[in-house]
Amino acid sequence: MFKKQSPVRLKDKKKSKPARRIIDPTKRMLLKQLALGASLFALFALLLAGVWYGTRLSSFTLTTVEVSGGETIDHAVVEAAVQKTLDGAYLGIIPRRFDWWYPEAAVYDAVRAVPRVKDPQIERTSGTSLSVTFDEYVPFALWCVDKTDTDCIFIDETGYAFTPAPKLKGGALVRYHSLGAAPKVGDRMTSTENIKTMTDFIHLVARNLNLEISVVEFDSADDVFYVLAGGGELRATLHDSASQVLDNLRTILASKEFAHIKPGNFQYIDLRFGNKVFVNEETGVASSTESGASTATSTVLDEGMGTTTR
């Protein structure tokens, strides 16, 4: 019923069937790696695009800087310093204004760099706003290169030098000169204890003796030299309390020998040796050979022992 095909024809058909192509394993691996690389690149590009646009959403962009604090510092200057710090982007991708990763430390340093700003506080109040609050350094005295120089730095009550001072004249602020140490912004002139001792003595002398101290010099050995506004110098040591030095000074000025002492008619009163006080008075002596020359008498007052003139 059915016709059988001859073996020869079957063989011919088998020969005419195309052979299966086998890809070289090395090429197959290369293609897989290329496909994986393309997938990863596409994923990275998608992620980068998401970061790019996501970090630039207006609800996550710091645009407003609210400044408060201080009395004489221009808030616009502080705001400008913060806004400048927020400009730019990390690696050119993520804006520095992105509220999650804004440069808080750099903003703090920028605010601190504004003259007279003290103890700034930076707080993110929303996704679009930063709050900046601060105190203000108040000039307490001047730290000068020399006791007669106008090249000075403002210091606060702790001795911290916070900003250069303009060329000031007059005695509104006491001038301090540290022998052997140059004034520098950011440094502390001396210890807080030394500042307190010197300040206390200045106030005690003004209140009890009506003497005005305009310049204070001190050295690393804790010797201190108070220059009176009208002339004359009070020498003391920072190892003694202000009240102790005042008591010795009052004893001197209350004695008959020195009742005439006042600013301008003496060179110095040395109070560094406890009850033994040295007084150097300036007296004018005129002669035919030394016209206008001056000599000094050094008087030692030892409480309980009287005075000795040298």
Image (cartoon, grey):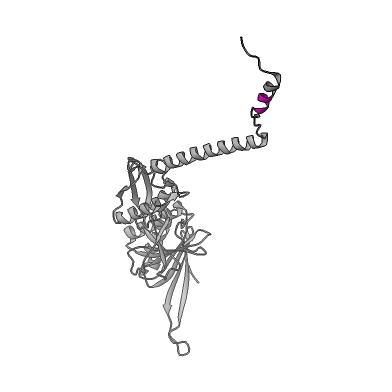
Horizontal side of 284 relative to 126 (left or right) equals: right
Q: Residue at x 36, y 66 (%)?
A: 166
Q: Residue at x 40, y 40 (%)?
A: 100
Q: Nearer the viewer, residue 196 or 277?
A: 196
Residue 148 screen position, x and y as percent: 42, 71
Please check the rendered image and state whether residue 16 is part of the magenta-colored stretch, yes or no. yes
Residue 298 screen position, x and y as percent: 48, 71
Vertical relation: 148 (above or below) 206:
below
Is the N terminus in the top left, top right, bottom left or bottom right quadrant?
A: top right
User: How many labels were placed on the picture?
Assistant: 0
Q: Quadrant of residue 101?
A: top left
Evaluate whether residue 73 shows in this view: no
Q: Nearer the viewer, residue 59 or 169?
A: 59
Magenta span main SS: helix
Looking at the rendering, the stretch of residues picked out in magenta corresponds to 12-17
Q: Nearer the viewer, residue 295 or 181?
A: 181
Q: Nearer the viewer, residue 41 or 300?
A: 41
Residue 211 screen position, x and y as percent: 34, 64
Please check the rendered image and state whether residue 101 is part of the magenta-colored stretch, yes or no. no
Q: Residue furthest bottom?
A: 288
